[in-house]
Image (cartoon, rainbow, N blue to C red):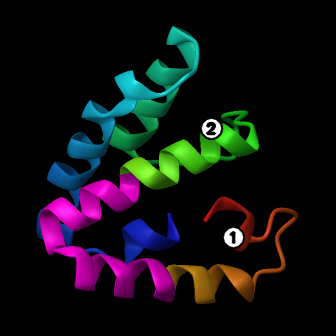
Amino acid sequence: TVLFAALPEAQLFAFRRLVASKLGEMKADTELRLRLRAWLEHGGGLARIALDVQQLRSLLNFIYSGLCEVFGPVHADQLLSAAVRQVEGMNLRLPPQKLL
């Protein structure tokens, strides 16, 4: 959600739908993919959706791929780097570097 908060409001909904359209490629059961799709399309918290590290990596990859499509690779790198720096300061259980 840190990364989504940095995106222009006018493009956020379309971006979330673009990422949601890629979820069919994720190695996860149908229920999990549906919950992720709902999160992407309607917002809210991701904390109640149990994802393992590999699934989190896949989701981040889909998000990064979408950023590249919408904003180009240079801006996508800048957005992702800024989000990682911001999340690092939160001292979460899973550091963002483990997902990259």
**Range covered by the magenta-colored residues:** 63-82
Give the percent coordinates (x, y) of residue 12.
22, 61
Q: Tell me residue 33's x, y (percent).
A: 48, 22
**Snapshot quadrant of residue 37:** top left
Residue sitting at 74 percent across and 89 percent down? 89
With 61 as the anchor, is 10 left or right in this view? left
In this image, 45 relative to 13: left or right? right
Q: Amino acid at mark 1?
A: Pro
Identify the residue under disc 1: 96
Q: Which disc, if any, is residue 80?
A: none
In the image, taking residue 9 as reference, residue 43 lies left or right, namely right
Q: Residue pushed farthest right?
A: 93
| SS category of the residue bearing label 1 | helix
Q: Residues within 10 Å of mark 1 (few under 14, many from 20)?
A: some
Of 47 and 52, which appears nearest the observer?
A: 52
Q: Quadrant of residue 54?
A: top right
Image position, residue 87 (x, y; %): 66, 79
- Which residue is found at the position 66% from the left and 34% from the top? 49
Image quarter hosting the C terminus: bottom right
Q: In terms of secondary structure, where does tag 2 sit?
A: helix
- In the rendered structure, does residue 98 fall within the stretch colored magenta? no
Indicate yes or no whether the magenta region holds residue 73: yes
Q: Classify mark 2: residues with Cα within 10 Å, few (<14), some (14-19) or many (20+).
A: some
Q: Which residue is at the front of the view, 39 or 30?
A: 30
Q: Earlier in the sequence, mark 1 or mark 2?
A: 2
Whole-percent x, y for residue 67 in the image: 27, 65
Residue sitting at 25 percent across and 84 percent down? Answer: 75
Task: Tell me how many marks there are.
Answer: 2
Q: Which residue is mark 2?
A: 55
**57 over 92 or under it: above or below:** above
Q: Residue type at mark 2: give it.
A: Gln
Looking at the image, residue 29 sits to the left or right of residue 76; the answer is right
